[in-house]
Amino acid sequence: MEAQETVPEPPRGTPGMAAGDDPAEVSGFVAAQAARHGVIGNRAALLVIAAGEVSARLREPADVRVWRAEDGLYCAFRTASGRPAEPRPTPGVELVTAGPVTVLRLPL
């Protein structure tokens, strides 16, 4: 799914990190958060790859958050300026953008 629509917000207290110009750091954070939520192996790798792609295409720093919901594991990137990343879709991971937010969802 790639669209301009309303995106889910992370629950209050969701751990996050500031993404700069190091996609490997973002990938490591997303992998650790996926494992924290019980998502490991190939399933987690799909989200880690997609998050690395988003991070590599950011034009500015962003706040990154990862959380689990009933319908999937989410990873959201929020920029301050309102310009979202322009990532390429990753098979198996849904992509939604709305204003300053790019959200990835790995269906579970």
Image (spheres, rainbow, N blue to C red):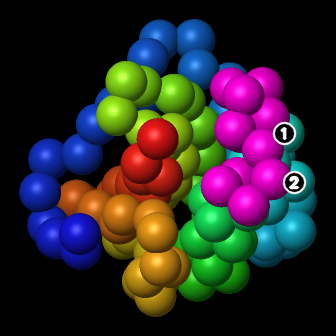
Residue placed under numbered mark 1 in the picture: 32
Task: Assess disc 1: are there few (<14), some (14-19) or many (≥20) residues with their C-alpha within 10 Å of its C-alpha.
Answer: some
Q: Is residue 103 left or right of residue 3?
A: right
Q: Is residue 63 left or right of residue 48?
A: left
Q: Residue 66, how many percent across, how many down?
A: 59, 37
Against 49, residue 104 (above or below) is: above
Can the viewer see residue 50? yes
Q: Is residue 19 left or right of residue 66?
A: right
Q: Is residue 20 left or right of residue 72?
A: right
Q: Residue at x 48, y 52 (%)?
A: 106
Q: Amino acid at mark 2?
A: Gly
Q: Which mark is residue 28?
A: 2
Against 27, residue 60 (above or below) is: below
Q: Residue at x 37, y 24 (%)?
A: 70
Question: In the rendered structure, which segment of residues is drawn in magenta?
Answer: 34-44
Task: Assess disc 2: are there few (<14), some (14-19) or many (≥20) residues with their C-alpha within 10 Å of its C-alpha.
Answer: some
- Residue found at the very far bottom of the displayed protein: 88
CB within 8 Å, label 2 to label 1: yes
- Residue found at the very far left of the displayed protein: 5
User: Is label 2 in a helix, a strand or a loop?
Assistant: helix
Q: Residue 90, how many percent across, how many down?
A: 50, 79
Q: Residue at x 36, y 63 (%)?
A: 94
Q: Is residue 38 magenta?
A: yes
Could you tell me how far apart the alpha carbons at marks 2 and 1 are, in whole angstroms? 6 Å
Can the viewer see residue 48? no
Q: Residue 91, how many percent across, how many down?
A: 47, 79
